[in-house]
Image (cartoon, grey):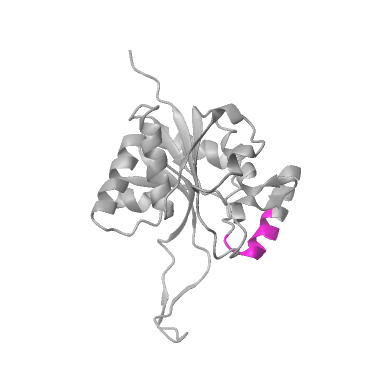
């Protein structure tokens, strides 16, 4: 009898967020009386998750006190110096409690606006095709290559370019092995897909939405606030 694979989520939340603020972590800023991290995790929990692993900083005594929905479904592990190390730590943690063929969604802590519809389409697409998949949107703007001194060298064709978002989804062992191999070979890993690409694992894009923003700078917080407010009424 075939075992039904489960779906897990991983949220790397150990970053310093230095581009947001030197003193404040972006995932703990408040929008509508909830932290950004709460919004993010609660969106993921609209899926039928077996569990969600948060990789947090060693000195983080705040995350575990937050009133998340489905709090009994949450797991915590120690994050790493970089995002990729936090993700790997979470995958190692998951390997102790999940099947190697279970699916894992990795989602940025600072993307609180991802919609349930996008999450569902990503999961269904990956499971139906049995391929790793990421949310992404086609690049809309004209792109310029500027090698130095703010001088344009040329216009870059955007025809084949997509802007990667999260979640990014793969089977547990496939993603864990890809990240471990890439790190061992000193490859720069900016997202899960880049590790999968390195080991020649097929990855498909599932078109997301432009309102799935990542809070990076302080003014992004106000934009996220407006988006979340608009999604309530849509």
| Residue 199 in view, yes or no | no
Measured as percent of width and height from the top left, residue 54 is found at 51, 40
Q: Quadrant of residue 5?
A: top left
At a point 50% along the width and 54% down the height, the residue shown is 15
The answer to whether any part of residue 152 appears in the image is: yes
Residue 182 drawn above or below residue 122: below
| Residue at 31% across, 36% down | 173
Between residue 16 and residue 3, name the one nearer to us. Answer: 16
Q: Residue visible at 59% across and 46% down?
A: 114
Q: Nearer the viewer, residue 53 or 113?
A: 53
Query: What residue is drawn where x is 64% and y is 38%?
Result: 65
Q: Position of residue 218 (x, y in %)?
A: 64, 64
Q: Looking at the rendering, in which quadrant would you find the C terminus?
A: top right
Q: Is residue 118 above or below residue 100?
A: below
Magenta stretch encompasses residue 140: no
Residue 215 placement (x, y as % from top left)? 59, 57
Asked if residue 49 is positioned above or below residue 1 in the image, the reply reads below
Quarter in which the N terminus is drawn: top left
Where does residue 30 sit, x and y in percent of width and height? 70, 51
**Region of the chain picked out in magenta, as a range:** 216-224
Dominant secondary structure of the residues highlighted in magenta in the image? helix
* Relative side of 85 to 214, left or right: left
């Amino acid at each position: 009898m075939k075992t039904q694979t489960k779906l897990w989520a991983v949220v790397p939340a150990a970053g310093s967020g230095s581009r947001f603020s030197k003193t404040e972590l972006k995932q703990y800023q408040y929008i509508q009386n909830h932290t950004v991290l709460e919004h993010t995790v609660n969106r993921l929990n609209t899926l039928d998750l077996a569990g969600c692993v948060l990789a947090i900083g060693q000195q983080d005594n705040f995350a575990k006190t937050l009133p998340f929905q489905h709090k009994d479904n949450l797991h915590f592990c120690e994050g790493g110096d970089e995002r990729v190390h936090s993700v790997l730590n979470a995958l190692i943690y998951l390997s102790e409690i999940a099947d190697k063929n279970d699916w894992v969604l990795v989602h940025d802590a600072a993307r609180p606006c991802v919609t349930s519809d996008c999450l569902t389409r990503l999961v269904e697409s990956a499971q139906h095709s049995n391929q790793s998949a990421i949310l992404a949107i086609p690049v809309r703007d004209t792109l310029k290559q500027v090698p130095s001194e703010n001088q344009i060298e040329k216009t870059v064709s955007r025809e084949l370019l997509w802007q990667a978002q999260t979640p990014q989804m793969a089977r547990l062992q496939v993603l864990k092995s890809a990240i471990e191999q890439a790190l061992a070979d000193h490859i720069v890993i900016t997202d899960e897909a880049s590790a999968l690409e390195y080991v020649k694992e097929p990855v498909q894009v599932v078109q997301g939405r432009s309102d799935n923003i990542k809070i990076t700078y302080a003014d992004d917080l106000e934009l996220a606030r407006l988006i979340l407010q608009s999604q309530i009424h849509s």
